[in-house]
Amino acid sequence: MRRLFSFRSTAEEEPPKTGFVGDLSKEQEKCLNEIKEWVVNEKIEDPEVLNFDDHAYLRFCRARNFVLKDAQAMLQKYVTWRRDEQVEDILDTFDKDVQKGIWKYYEHGNH
């Protein structure tokens, strides 16, 4: 006997968004835009120094499941750590003698 009606939905559900650039839901895109605005408005870091693109901001958003306050807190801690550890100046202040000592034991300098 042939069925006349199908009870399955004919409209296919859209698969969940991954949270990567080009595959964002409206909520994810809103979180991305708000965190970028927050960095500029709150002067968290000079945009030239931070040098973030959408991919970098989305790393923080995905890590905190697109909860804006949590992503902001994580980004703030990251920026604070970079300042405290003087990451921007590391190449200028690196002691070359330390490097030579490392090469004595690790010829490739990878460790």
Image (cartoon, helix red, strand yellow):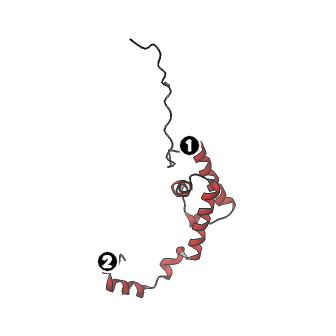
- As rendered, which of 46 and 20 lies closer to the eye? 20
Residue type at mark 2: give it: His
Q: Quadrant of the N terminus?
A: top left
Q: Is residue 35 left or right of residue 3?
A: right
In the rendered image, residue 99, in percent from the top left (x then y), is placed at 39, 83
Instruction: State which tag comes first along the sequence, 1 or 2.
Output: 1
For residue 108, which numbered disc appears in the image? 2
- As rendered, which of 9 and 92 lies closer to the eye? 9
Residue type at mark 1: give it: Ser
* Residue at 57% from the left image edge and 72% from the top image edge: 81
Number of other residues with Cα within 10 Å of mark 2, as a class: few under 14, some 14 to 19, many 20 or more: few
In the rendered image, residue 92, in percent from the top left (x then y), is placed at 50, 80
Question: Residue 43 is drawn in which quadrant?
Answer: bottom right
Q: Is residue 7 left or right of residue 34?
A: left
Look at mark 1 in the image and give the residue it sits on.
Answer: 25
In the rendered image, residue 98, in percent from the top left (x then y), is placed at 41, 86
Residue located farthest toward the right when viewing the structure as drawn: 41
Q: CA distance from mark 1 to mark 2?
A: 45 Å
In the rendered image, residue 108, in percent from the top left (x then y), is placed at 31, 77
Number of other residues with Cα within 10 Å of mark 1, as a class: few under 14, some 14 to 19, many 20 or more: some
* Residue at 62% from the left image edge and 58% from the top image edge: 70
